[in-house]
Image (cartoon, grey):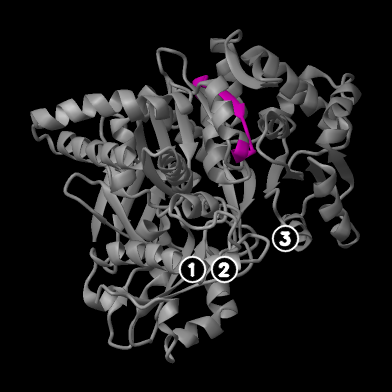
Amino acid sequence: MTQFDTPALVEADPQANATDLLVDRVAQTPSSVLFSVPDGDGWSPITTQQFYDQVIALAKGLVAAGIQPGDKIGLMSKTRYEWTLIDFATWFAGAVLVPVYETSSPQQVKWNLADSGATSVILETADHFARFDEVHPELPEIGNVWQIELGDLDKLAAAGVGVDDAEIERRRTLAVGSDIATLIYTSGSTGKPKGCVLTHSNFVELARNSAVALKEVVHDPRGASTLLFITTAHVFARFISVLSVHAGVRVGHQPDTKLLLPSLGSFKPTFLLAVPRVFEKVYNVSEQKAEAGGKGKIFRAAADAAVEHSRLVQEGKPVPFGLKIKFKLFDKLVYSKLRTAMGGNVTYAVSGSAPLGPRLGHFYHSLGITILEGYGLTETTAPATVNLANKSKIGTVGPALPGVSVRTADDGEIEVKGVNVFKEYWKNPEATAASFDGEWYKTGDLGSFDADGFLTITGRKKEIIVTAGGKNVAPAALEDPIRANPLVGQIVVVGDQKPFISALVTLDPEMLPAWLGNNGQDAGMSLAAAVKNPAVLAEVQRAIDAANESVSRAESIRKFVVLNTEFTEASGHLTPKMSIKRDNILRDYSGEIEGMYSGAPATEGISTAG
């Protein structure tokens, strides 16, 4: 068993709750801009004092509407300014927010609201209301139903003008650190989602310690700012929102990723929060655009030079004169354009939820963007480990954050204890007991440390494949590099108790037309035709062969099928954060899987690597 502990940098305050973070921020910088909201092609500022005043007004409205301390309020909304406004107003009213993913089905909405015991719900759009309304008759405890796009937040604030300031102050100070702050349901990659009870101390202590550990990120001398585009219903963005209020980071929101690049251009953030798929998309789109403009070779040469340059710098080795010259040239031709596309000010990016891969980490590093990969779960209020500005190793998820201890058990399972670890699973003592070894939360993930305490994730314990020959295979080691290919949407490695490893592959419908056009194929080709196209199959084969080079022959993918479909959240094959629901896929595509082990034709992919 290997263990690393990072002492807390901020003394714990067991009486503090999340509202104190905003109260302290108002006292320090009332006139600084804390949020920017979309306004035509630009952004309108909201100061810390203005945000605080709006929080108090909405909290009074909730009180006037009958919300009692401890009541659960459901929230179903895309990432937007009002999300954090509602979050803090709920805390100031003494209540507890229960996020619902904006993509949830009616049955998922019903589960979250019923299991949590929510008595009110706030919905963003008419579509959200329709999904809720379908199951409303089965939710008798839900009394208040408010809709953001109908102006109900303003109506609530107007109705609460008669509530005394003293009542809000009384309510906001009721909770202490050990009390529940929110109830977040896991994304449910297996079984029913479980409600994670996160406490006020989880947010307060983790935010206060993270602000010190990540001071270069959240205290940029230019004025730190970030544009959030991943869902705030997920703990990753939710924690960053709370951290930003505590640290005084200016925050904007853009839930539509199709508008991400123009929004980055106008907002000009200093750091980003993203999942690896976003960084892969930016790279792949840039590569295909260069290819379409006849500059594909230049782009790939620039990418190779960037990766080589970053590797040498990280290893402390001298950069050859020729590479220095190439690097400067490519900086003008390629890197500067990518920096400009991302707003021109991005210095750091925090990446989580899945491994990024060293190549992309080195590529962005050479652009002047340090990607700080981190690791965490809903149960750890998001980050447990993260690379720091002055303590970073590409390819790892960094050391333990201050106030956090991380260890690996004898079988490699990662266990965490500290200020960030959740209290319990809601109304599920059996699952809680099974997930803890004393104070240590058993994550179910596998990893290893280097001598400096930097953690590397190697896979999920429950996803380890054991072949008929007894070989243990971690799917992520193969899936992550293959998924980085512009053609590949998703890949699922299979082979448990089978004679060799195989894979199910889906194509990326957004990237497919550009790739086809750039490779002498019909850009308008249908998905059904593309999955049988020899050029497409050869490209998927190339990506698989490259991944196979990093593993033993027994672990390599020997056969694959490209499916004439997509894995989506609606199909039940992806979680809201776009992680694959492996069990569902194995069940629904059992026929295709068995076909690969009973003489599937060569056109469906037989690896040439082994």
Q: Position of residue 182 (x, y in %)?
A: 64, 44
Marks 3,2: beta carbons within 8 A: no
In the image: residue 315, left or right of residue 33 = left
Give me the disc on residue 420.
none
Q: CA distance from mark 1 to mark 2?
A: 6 Å
Query: Few, some or many C-alpha atoms within 10 Å of disc 2 (few <14, some 14-19, many ≥20)?
Result: few
Of pointers 3 and 1, the one earlier in the residue sequence? 3
Amino acid at the residue labelled 3: Gln
Q: Position of residue 235 (x, y in %)?
A: 55, 44
Q: Pointer 1: what residue? A: 533
- Give whichever of 40, 605 is nearer the camera: 605
Q: Quadrant of residue 111?
A: bottom right
Horizontally, residue 558 falls left or right of residue 595, namely left
Residue wearing tag 2? 529
Check residue 250 for magenta coloring.
yes
Image point 28% across, 87% down: which residue? 469
Q: Which residue corresponds to the image point at 76% horizontal and 63% vertical from the top-left?
A: 107
Local secondary structure at mark 2: helix
Q: Nearer the viewer, residue 18 or 575?
A: 575
Label number found at residue 108: 3
Residue stretch in magenta:
247-258
